[in-house]
Amino acid sequence: MRDVIVVGGRVAGSSTAMLLARRGLDVLLVDRAGFPSDTLSTHQIQVPGVAKLRRWGLLDKVVASGAPPARAVSFDVGGIVLRGHFPTFEGVDAVYSPRRTVLDALLLDAARGAGAEVRERFAVEELTTDGDRVTGIRGRGHGGAAVTETARLVVGADGKHSMVAAAVSAPAYRVKPPLTMAYYTYWEGVDCPGGELYTRERRAIGAWPTNDGLAMTYVGWPIDEFSAFRSDVEGNFLATLDKAGDLGARVRAGARAERFRGSPDLPNFFRKPYGPGWALVGDAGLVMDPITGQGIGHAFRDAELLAEAVEAGLGGDRPLAGALADYQRRRDRAATPIYDFTTDLASFGPPRPESMALFEALARQPEEVDRFLGAITGSTPLDQYLSPGNLVRILGIRAMAGIVLSRLRQGARREAPARPAEPADARG
């Protein structure tokens, strides 16, 4: 019997398997894909995620792959452009956007190098159980006979449509339906030295440098416009880039290097990430709209949290269920502020007065922009940055008081009772 079987070998699964194997556990990692292979992705590894790669001894390999650092970023909210640099966090000061053909293979090799057994092209067909406890997996390699493997814990790292989560009926909470659809592609001959983010009316746009000298561009539209977008993917994609300063002109001066990739299947939810004999990590347990590019960094964070819990639970320091419950609490506490921020941004609602006031204040305080970038990329807890005390510091007491008063008035209007309709004969 193994200590742990990890189902899914991309960023969450390979990271979890690597960290557990480095702790001396007997780990089997399986994935239905062969590597290197591509998958839909936001690409961005936010600064805290890059810091984890550095701590794990893997950042040099990402750099050696040719994935360039993006240390500067512009955030254009239409009429207000914030330009700054990512603040240094645990020795790193850049976002990297490697291709998934590069990153996933690198992490899988790291798991293998740490001592995990890795089986590529292995399809898990079902979980094995003893009563309500998961005891292992049953599946087969490419063209092979069915085999059964048992473990003290099975970890589902198999994405938002996790087979493991479905098999154990893991409950979901804080669920929000898909809010956007997203498409991206790659360009050669396009200058993109740093990150570029644009918000326009019912549109989101991003551009980041990636491997092989390519620029990756992303566009997000509201989900209710998916059919309109699909009617002319290239035309609508380019028309959206034209709304982003000179980005449309720059990509037209270059050449598209690959096909368009995208999806309307972008749900938002937390799942309970543990139960008898099983746990979830990465998108299997928590997924949010890609508009803020958090997925890879969150997968790394949750892999570390889960590995700590599993080591404590299987090592006898504390009951496994208690350690995994703590994993859920720590994950949810870390993820909730950016989850709320992300789903609010992805709703494409009208700009809130407090948001515009903040952007206007930041535009007058260039030294503050870096701190803001640190908050939205995870170097600083977002809820701390957006706390009333910090907003008073940035906006000033009078501006903050005006925003609070405006919100109170809006709330009062929403709660006011409707005026009764007059009788028809009184209206004439």
Image: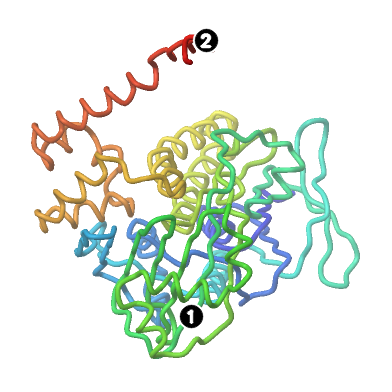
Q: Residue at x 56, y 73 (%)?
A: 105
Callout 2: 10 Å neighbours few (<14), some, many (20+)? few
Cα distance, mark 2 to mark 1? 66 Å
Q: Is residue 306 left or right of residue 212?
A: right
Dot 2 lies on which element? helix
- Image-quadrant location for residue 73: bottom left
Q: How many marks?
A: 2
Identify which residue is drawn at 67% across, 40% down.
278
Q: Position of residue 403 (x, y in %)?
A: 20, 32
The percent position of residue 146, horizontal first and vertical second, equals: 89, 60
Q: Which mark is residue 82?
A: none
Label 1 sits on a secondary structure element that is strand
- Residue 1 location (% of width, % of height): 75, 49
Instruction: Indicate the quadrant where residue 6 lies.
Output: bottom right
Label 1 crowd bin: few (<14), some (14–19), many (20+), radius 10 Å: many
Residue toward you, 406 or 263: 406
Residue 186's disc number: 1
Under mark 2, the amino acid is Asp
Q: Residue at x 43, y 13 (%)?
A: 419
Q: Is residue 417 above or below residue 363?
A: above
Q: Position of residue 220 (x, y in %)?
A: 48, 61
Q: Amino acid at mark 1?
A: Tyr
Residue 241 lies, with reference to residue 383, above or below; the image says below
Question: First in sequence: mark 2 or mark 1?
Answer: 1
Label 2–label 1 contact, CB within 8 A: no
Name the residue that disc number 2 marks. Answer: 425
